[in-house]
Image (tube, rainbow, N blue to C red):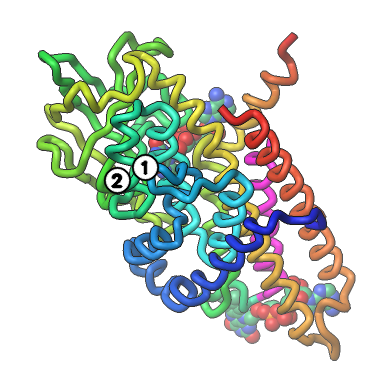
Amino acid sequence: MHFQENESVTMVRQMVRDFAEKHIRPDMMVWDESQTFPIEVFKGLGELGLMGVLVPENYGGSGFGYYEYAAAIEELAKVCGSVGLSMAAHNSLCTGHIMQFGNEDQKQRWLPKLASAEWIGAWGLTEANTGSDALRMKCVAHKDGNEWVLNGAKNWITHGISGDIAVVLARTGDLLDSHGITAFVVERGTPGFSGGKKENKLGMRASETAEMIFEDCRIPEENVLGNIGDGFIQAMKVLDGGRISIASLSLGIAKGAYEAALKYSKEREQFGKPISNFQAIAFKLADMATKIEAAELLIQESCDLKTRVKT
Amino acid sequence: MAKYYASEVSVYCANEAVQIFGGYGYTKDFPVEKFYRDCKLCTIGEGTSEIQKLVISRAILKD
Ligand SMILES: Cc1cc2nc3c(=O)[nH]c(=O)nc-3n(C[C@H](O)[C@H](O)[C@H](O)COP(=O)(O)OP(=O)(O)OC[C@H]3O[C@@H](n4cnc5c(N)ncnc54)[C@H](O)[C@@H]3O)c2cc1C
Ligand SMILES: Cc1cc2nc3c(=O)[nH]c(=O)nc-3n(C[C@H](O)[C@H](O)[C@H](O)COP(=O)(O)OP(=O)(O)OC[C@H]3O[C@@H](n4cnc5c(N)ncnc54)[C@H](O)[C@@H]3O)c2cc1C
């Protein structure tokens, strides 16, 4: 990318690169093989302010914008996609939801813990039978006095077992009613809330993906985020921001793969010359570089939009 | 558009990178096999590529 990068973006990039070389690269294949979620890495990222990248400083965050956020995820993903994904889910989804839709008390209560990585965050929308079609969710919450009683399960949740806090979307109205879903904050240790099956995945194996189970789980009224019935609309907005993070995650992986291939193609010799001398290989590199550049421009544009129309 | 495009680019690049590495790309001694496995999440998580296209096409077709 040939735009002049903001100084703080360059600083974040360098900080993440150093951290990843020191604390991620040496052990990442071990975590990958054994599907270990390396919680200490996230505590370390917390110390660098990367677990509350977008959180304002008065709530214990770094107060950065989307450019810094995108750069941090990209640099993590160049080394290890799993760490990038977990960092993105913690920041964009769980923390992002509380930051955008929590009231002042809720923000004071939870954001500092999330931003420092004292607590790892999870965000539960998906269920076993409802992925793309999230409106059909079965997880329900009923009002009982000044508490809500949550029943059901969420699947495919990043940090479903290890998360200390979860934002959970549950039905409080009619099936398929986009105003029939509400967002609740559930803290680990709440009776009736437990972790379930952990998925055994193709990739992103160091990022924990698991089930969250709710059995007559009682949640106080003050843990409702925003208005009753606004949960689905909130979730769609949270995902809008989250998509910049998945785009950056993608860009990091693409660059990591491209850079490794570029280097290898100059070193590997066949038929008496480096394979990069063969047009078949050189054209592959040209296509990769072009697509990466285009993806990066789209992400830059999204960051720009997100920065200018900040809500 | 950024999410849809970038995620497809990551799958494209990881695939080509493994090809450039030849047999070595198919092993855990080089990082490209991990990129190849990890990248696939990007076209699925937080809205699959098909759902992104649904959102994009709705936006360009409205009015
Ligand atoms: C590693 C990982 C981490 C995740 N983390 C979280 C998390 O933290 N929180 C959370 O809530 N969820 C999480 N998810 C779930 C993720 O958001 C879903 O997997 C995703 O939304 C897709 O849903 P699905 O897997 O049920 O696929 P489905 O919705 O069953 O889709 C299957 C296929 O059908 C296609 N399809 C579906 N509907 C349509 C349509 N209308 N038109 C055309 N094609 C369609 C899809 O594009 C896809 O190709 C995670 C998933 C993974 C793999
Ligand atoms: C699972 C597995 C099992 C195998 N089993 C056997 C076996 O039983 N017996 C055996 O003998 N071998 C075996 N092999 C080796 C296999 O045949 C080689 O991996 C294959 O021939 C490619 O060689 P390479 O990996 O050294 O890649 P390279 O030759 O280094 O190629 C790297 C890249 O450069 C490209 N390239 C190379 N030369 C040119 C050129 N002139 N023009 C354009 N592009 C070029 C290639 O297409 C590739 O994309 C096995 C490999 C694997 C992965």
The one nearer the camera, A260 or A14, is: A14
Side of B37 relative to B20 (left or right)? left
**In x, y percent, where is residue A203?**
47, 58
Disc 1 + disc 2, Cβ < 8 Å: yes
Question: Which mark is on residue A192?
Answer: none
Q: For residue A46, which quarter of the picture?
A: bottom left
Rendered view: A178 above or below A47: above
* Label 1 C-beta lies within 8 Å of the nearest ligand 1 atom: yes
Q: Are marks 1 and 2 on the same chain?
A: yes
* Label 2 C-beta lies within 8 Å of the nearest ligand 1 atom: yes
**In whole angstroms, how far apart are the C-alphas of marks 1 and 2?**
8 Å
Q: Is residue A117 in view from this perspective?
A: yes
Rendered view: A245 above or below A152: below
Question: Which mark is on residue A160?
Answer: 2
SS of the residue under disc 1: strand
- Tell me which residue sits at (45%, 46%) in the image: A57
- Tell me which residue sits at (36%, 28%) in the image: A102
Which stretch did the figure color magenta?
A: B1-22
Location of mark 1 (residue): A156
Pointer 1: residues within 10 angstroms few (<14), some, or many (20+)? many
Side of A202 relative to B49 (left or right)? left
Tag 2: amino acid:
Gly
Rendered view: A57 above or below A101: below
Q: Is residue A128 in view from this perspective?
A: no
